Image (cartoon, rainbow, N blue to C red):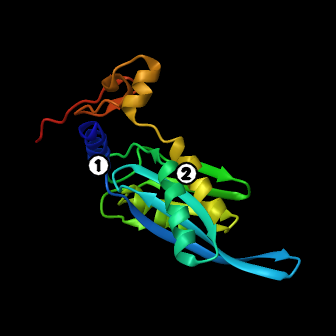
Amino acid sequence: MAERENRGRGRGRNREEETPEFADRLVAINRVSKTVKGGKRFGFAALVVVGDQRGRVGFGKGKAKEVPEAIRKATEQAKRQLIRVPLKEGRTLHHDVKGHHGAGKVVMRTAPEGTGIIAGGPMRAVFEMLGVKDVVSKSTGSQNPYNMIRATLDGLRNESSPRQVASRRGKKVADILPKRDDHPQIDGEQAPVSEEA
């Protein structure tokens, strides 16, 4: 009987060890109040972004009377709401995307190596936790951090890799990606190559 219990506990520990380590970033913390019969009760609301910096990211919000408890609740919620985003070369997006939530609108563009993360506030936290190293983004409309993060994640959900597009169309990846020819083409005919070189 004791052996069975120990076996079950051991399995649970292995699962915890197998789960990847997540990094988290506190984006915003607000003091909130609830009006009750005796006056006002004050608490704190936390907004946290969590990611494994290898293509998974999520956000969560938590409320509590103390700041650490609010952050803990937000982190747990974020870990339950992770989404996977395909990254090009593990550093940038595959294509430009737009996202919106409510009045918050964001535009995210793929960028060459060495560009860095050009993003403001809450969007930067999402990209850092996602593991993106090169991206150019712009936020218009609502500057509310909740809406900005939701709009960013809305755009990232629409991100798709060439492999995903190929499988949806029933084609090979090589058929979808543009072919790179050695010589440029003019009106469907191959351009003449100069023999001076």
In the image, is residue 39 above or below residue 10? below
Q: Position of residue 101 (x, y in %)?
A: 68, 53
Q: Which mark is residue 106?
A: none
Please give the name of the residue rendered at 41% of the width and 22% of the height, measured from the top-left corner.
167
In the image, is residue 101 above or below residue 145? above
Q: Position of residue 122 (x, y in %)?
A: 54, 67
> Furthest residue to the front?
1
Q: Which residue is mark 1?
A: 13
Q: Which mark is residue 153?
A: 2
Please give the name of the residue rendered at 38% of the width and 49% of the height, measured from the top-left corner.
55
Q: Position of residue 157 (x, y in %)?
A: 53, 43
Counting the numbered discs, the total is 2
The answer to whether any part of residue 97 appears in the image is no
| Quarter of the image that includes the C terminus | top left
Along the viewing direction, whichever of 181 and 45 lies nearer the viewer: 45
Along the viewing direction, whichever of 42 and 105 lies nearer the viewer: 42
Please give the name of the residue rendered at 25% of the width and 39% of the height, measured from the top-left corner.
7
Does residue 33 appear to the left or right of 111 in the view shown? right
> Furthest residue to the left?
197
